[in-house]
Image (tube, rainbow, N blue to C red):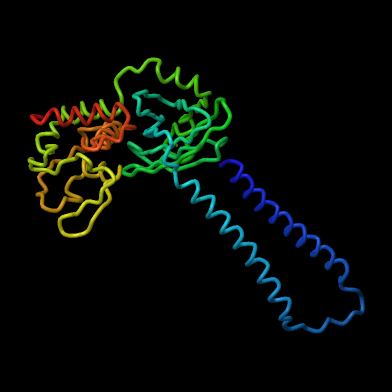
Amino acid sequence: MSSEVDNLLFFLLAVSVFFTLVIFASIFYFAIRYRRRPNDPPPPEVHGGMALEILWSVIPFGLTMIMFVWGASVFFAMSRPPDDAIEVWAVGKQWMWKLQHLEGQREINELHIPVGRPVKLTMTSEDVIHSFYVPAFRTKSDVLPGRYTTTWFTPTKPGKYHLFCAEYCGNKHSGMIGWVYAMEPEAYQAWLSGGTSGGTLVSNGQKLFEENACGNCHKPDNSGRCPSLVGLFGKTVELSGGGTVKADEAYIRESILNPSAKVVAGYQPVMPTFQGLVTEEGVVQLVEYIKSLTPKTPATGAAPAAKKAASQAATNSPNR
Ligand code: CUA
């Protein structure tokens, strides 16, 4: 994206510089050429000039429309992560970046990613507003408490790039910095396979799911007091009191921390909140676990091993 952002910026700069020069040159030229000379009478007043009015309305209008359409197209491209993007979760807190990979690697103020593949970040904050800013990638995205925001980029050149927090977030805001390491794919694979301390996000999520006894009510066969979570992710959910919601990451997060906000049609608001019991990183793990709960039936073959294992584990433990 960086070259597209740069091209747009240079276009804006070029337009600004061009008109600044034209306007200032005209001011000086007219000021000197038509300066008041002794004994000159005041000039007659001039009214109107339709051709000129139209000309200097239409040209700026055209230019600003070019800026608008161009800017919007870059903005939309930046807002839509490709489907094949590598997913990484980021949690900002005063004053550090905590990053989790699906494979289970957890990093603080460091992000390792491979070159040549799009990377999607889903981000939230534990406390105040932060902003994930990698100048070399021309990417800056606010990280908000209580909400998931996403950003994405495709690193093209291996190297080490500065990561900043770009939103004043307290007295150590300027220290909330780190590095993004864009690595050759082989080096990245080596990094991934080295030193996973504690399981994948899905398996950690499953652990949390069991520790918090979520399965006591959310039984996979829908016999519990709460809806089954198998196959939930991405579906449209009917709510009690009318309306629907798409079961995305934000909906799952809200249902864990504020379960009475959106109650599924046909169910009672019996679930307690897990606010304070599960950290934002824990919620991320639970979200990934719930995403992995796919119905066992037509196996797509290409499903990652982790997903299969997790959904098997889920169906194998109805006593939870
Ligand atoms: Cu976080 Cu500034």
Q: Quadrant of residue 273?
A: top left
Is residue 255 positioned above or below 296 on the image? below
Closer-to-camera residue (144/112): 112
Give residue 197's position: percent from left, percent from top. 32, 17
Give residue 179's position: percent from left, percent from top. 50, 27
In the displayed structure, does residue 59 sit left or right of residue 245?
right
The residue lying at 24 percent from left, 29 percent from top is: 205
Closer-to-camera residue (306/205): 306
Q: Quadrant of the N terminus?
A: top right
Is residue 64 positioned above or below 6 on the image? below
- Which residue extends farthest top? 195
Tell how many labels. 0
Closer-to-camera residue (220/215): 220
Q: Quadrant of the C terminus?
A: top left
In the displayed structure, does residue 42 sit left or right of residue 245?
right
In the displayed structure, does residue 254 sit left or right of residue 6?
left
Give residue 286's position: percent from left, percent from top. 25, 34
Is residue 266 positioned above or below 253 on the image? below
Q: Quadrant of residue 274?
A: top left
The residue lying at 49 percent from left, 51 percent from top is: 76
Give residue 39's position: percent from left, percent from top. 92, 79
In the displayed structure, does residue 204 sit left or right of residue 131?
left
The residue lying at 22 percent from left, 31 percent from top is: 311
Closer-to-camera residue (44/6): 6
